[in-house]
Image (tube, rainbow, N blue to C red):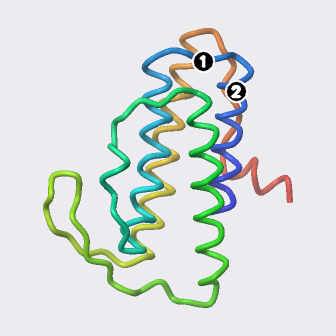
Amino acid sequence: MKYNDWANQRVLITYEEHAIEDDHLLTLFSHLISAQIVWLNRIKDLPTSPFPIWEQYKLRELRTMTMESSTNWLNYMDEHQFDTFEEMIFYKNSEEKRFESTIREIVTHMVNHSTYHRGQIALALKAKNIEPPVTDFIAYRRLK
């Protein structure tokens, strides 16, 4: 989870440095952050409706949402560091279909989902002649 936070922070800093106002770029990062919030709310059995999955947020809103989501996820992981994460979570998706997944599956999905969209963001930044931040996991590990 610390890697995911590091990578998201790097994207956010790039957005801020370039004062990104592009709808596509804002929508992609908004979706990534909203999904993180929704997944943790599902785990905690909290409402997910306040966070439409494809809502577009402004840069200043994304700063706040990113910080809060990161803090909440990191705290959750710290509080459950010795758990196996095999607990089954029952939830409805955005189309109100019922599903069940283990916490481990949800965490794995959430990190992979974020990586996928950061890749899309990198391509969109390059198309605008903006150098995307390096967000590869190995780059994060090399910092240790």
Where residue 21 appears, x then y in whole percent? 55, 15
Q: Nearer the viewer, residue 108 or 10?
A: 10
Report if the CB atoms under discs 2 and 1 are less than 8 Å apart. yes
Where residue 95 appears, x then y in whole percent? 15, 52
| Image quarter in which the C terminus is found | bottom right
* Disc sitting over residue 86 in the figure: none
Q: How many marks?
A: 2
At x 36% / y 34%, what residue is drawn?
Answer: 55
| Residue farthest along the right direction in this orientation | 144
Where residue 113 appears, x then y in whole percent? 44, 50
Check disc 2: other Cα within 10 Å, few if <14, some if 14-19, many if 20+: some
Amino acid type, residue under disc 2 in the picture: Thr
At x 42% / y 74%, what residue is drawn?
Answer: 44
- Spatial CA distance of label 2 from label 1 is 8 Å
Left/right of residue 97 with respect to residue 137 in the rendered view: left
Q: Secondary structure at mark 1?
A: loop
Q: What residue is shown with label 1? A: 20
Q: What residue is shown with label 2? A: 14
Check disc 1: other Cα within 10 Å, few if <14, some if 14-19, many if 20+: some
At x 51% / y 20%, what residue is drawn?
Answer: 124
